[in-house]
Image (cartoon, grey):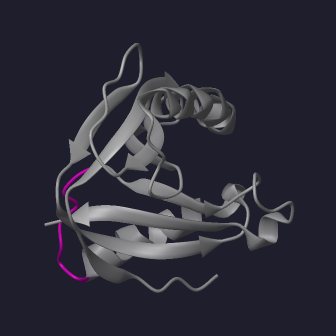
């Protein structure tokens, strides 16, 4: 698949999320366990997300993944337990779209990483994925749409 990379100027934004340790083979299952917890906390605060769910990958290894999953919010909310509300700082990001199953999303990450190197830029934070259309909205995985981004300096 061909990936076009663009630079986005992202503003500060509020999120509610849970950060957990998992393994590469359990990312989907972990995501499915964490997201309802975050959603319940948001509902309890009386607000709704202002966009689709996301994951931030703080560290990704062969045996361990440090990931954060949650939702963007219109404003800060009180949180408890594992759910943490915080502000993501404004940043420039190199971004591409992956259309298709998650089993091939690594190709999008490699394309953005290659673009960053080719442009002489530096990665300035952990990569993220925003799940604009996935299994909850669409049965056909060939039609899933995921935004893949890397903060850059």
Residue closest to the far front: 46
> Is 53 within the magenta?
no
Q: Position of residue 129 (x, y in %)?
A: 48, 56
Q: Quadrant of residue 115?
A: bottom left
Q: Quadrant of the C terminus?
A: bottom left
Q: Residue at x 37, y 48 (%)?
A: 73
Q: Position of residue 1 (x, y in %)?
A: 64, 81
The reply, left or right, for residue 40 in relation to residue 120 is right
Q: Quadrant of residue 33?
A: top right
Residue closest to the far top: 81
Q: Is residue 53 above or below residue 46?
A: below
User: What stretch of residues is rendered in magenta?
Assistant: 119-125
Depth order, front residue of 91/50: 50
Depth order, front residue of 34/96: 34
The reply, left or right, for residue 26 in relation to residue 108 is right
Q: What is the magenta segment's predominant secondary structure?
A: loop
The reply, left or right, for residue 112 in relation to residue 13 is right
Q: Quadrant of residue 150?
A: bottom left
Q: Is residue 20 above or below residue 98?
A: above
């Amino acid at each position: 698949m061909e990936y076009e990379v663009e630079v986005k100027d992202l503003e500060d934004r509020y999120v509610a999320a849970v950060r957990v340790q998992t393994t590469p083979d359990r990312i989907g299952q972990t995501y499915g366990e964490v997201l309802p917890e975050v959603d319940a906390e948001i509902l309890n605060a009386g607000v709704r997300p202002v966009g689709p769910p996301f994951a931030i990958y703080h560290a990704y290894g062969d045996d361990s993944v440090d990931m954060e999953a949650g939702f963007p919010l219109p404003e800060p909310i009180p949180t408890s337990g594992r759910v943490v509300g915080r502000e993501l700082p404004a940043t420039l990001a190199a971004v591409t779209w992956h259309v298709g199953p998650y089993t091939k999303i690594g190709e999008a990450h490699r394309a953005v990483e290659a673009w960053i190197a080719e442009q002489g830029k530096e990665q300035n934070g952990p990569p993220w994925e925003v799940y604009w259309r996935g299994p909850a909205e669409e049965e056909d995985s060939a039609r899933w749409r995921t935004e893949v981004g890397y903060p850059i300096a």
